[in-house]
Amino acid sequence: MTSPPIGRRTLLAGVAAAATLCATAAGTGTARARTPASLTHKGVNFDTDRDVWRTEYVRREIAAVKEQLHGNAVLLLGHRLDRLTEAASIAAAHGLFVWFEPRQFDQDAEQTLAFLGSVARAAESLRTRYPCVGLSVGTELTIFMSGLVPGKDYAERGRALGRPESAGYQQRLNAFLGRAVGTVRPLFHGPVTYSSGDWEQVDWHGFDVVGANLYRNGDNRTSYTRALRALHRHGKPVVITEFGCCTFTGAGELGGSGFTAVDWEREPPVVKDGYVRDEREQAAEVGALLDLYAAERVYGAFVYNFIAPDSPYSPQRCHDLDIASFALVRTYPSGTRRGYAETGQWAPKQSFRAVADRFRCRTP
């Protein structure tokens, strides 16, 4: 069996069914007198967990975020400290605001905290040279960390969210987040957030920024703006840590589950029947969400994601894994003239241009 690229948290359908989009957070926060400016942070998710990692490729890609996409921030994801720190140093040198986000899967609380402490130290070391550095203590830990919800892996935990045996997981999550904040505060002195799932009821008192992974789909389309506005009630800057759309007709209706357009159990994986490549739909959905965030005075937004080399484009529909990719650029498979592994080449999709147009218009 070939697993779908773990970079886009491969939630099974049971997660979406069990999750509550408009979850009411445990903490109310204290309203601030000044409303932060909208889209101060204009950025992308940059996944460091990939098969091919070459410094020269990373340099070109991060330079493109700044110079071609007109972004001013990156959210770096991954489980390897060396890659996180290398990408962070490159991004900071380009003048980008750098957010670290450690992503380990299926680790327990103690293992997660140990790695988080290492990342916090690295982030603080970078912050002493470049002041624009932030830290997310994790993402959707109810499913990606063991111990909060029953299940041996993230797939089982996702399916278990709505079951009786998972009762109390919100309290367990917030207890762990309290430990996470307590771990990083003595080590890191920049802003701290958490990338929450829309089913998680986070107590935001200990955080500087409210972080939310907020994908729009057919089920939440009419309630999405209300859910977005509700994030402001905590009186802290709101950052959409993940949003995006895949690259086929109808992807906007599937939202964060767009990866299911591919049958990942086949070897090699194949695109399922009925899915047709459509860069226009991806561009329209991502562009509309950025417009909404600007109108709703969201402090920052990070498109998921910049590049996905493990889901390359193919002119053959059944092998075009980029159909099920959220990336703003497409890559090419190994063994071809433009193979990513051999050349590091990529090409902007229509969504890249849609994002660049909006980021450029909002550049001071």
Image (spheres, helix red, strand yellow):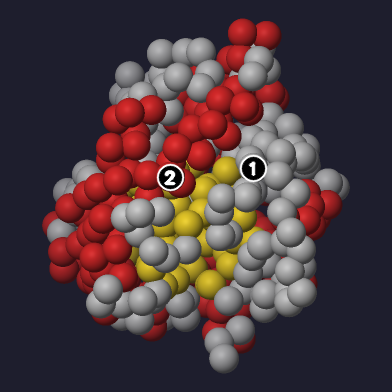
Q: Residue at x 30, y 61 (%)?
A: 123
Count numbered badges in the picture: 2
Instruction: Name the side, left or right, on which 151 lies relative to 103.
Output: right
Quarter of the image where one finds residue 174: top right
Q: Amino acid at mark 2?
A: Gly
Q: Nearer the viewer, residue 167 or 328?
A: 167
Q: Position of residue 252 (x, y in %)?
A: 67, 48
Which residue matches tag 2? 182
Which residue matches tag 1? 203
Q: Is residue 195 above or below residue 69?
A: above
Q: Quadrant of the N terminus?
A: top left
* Label 1: element kind: loop
Instruction: Name the side, left or right, on which 189 lies relative to 210.
Output: left
Q: Is residue 93 above or below residue 276?
A: below
Q: Amino acid at mark 1?
A: Asp
* Label 2: element kind: helix
Q: Position of residue 350 (x, y in %)?
A: 53, 67
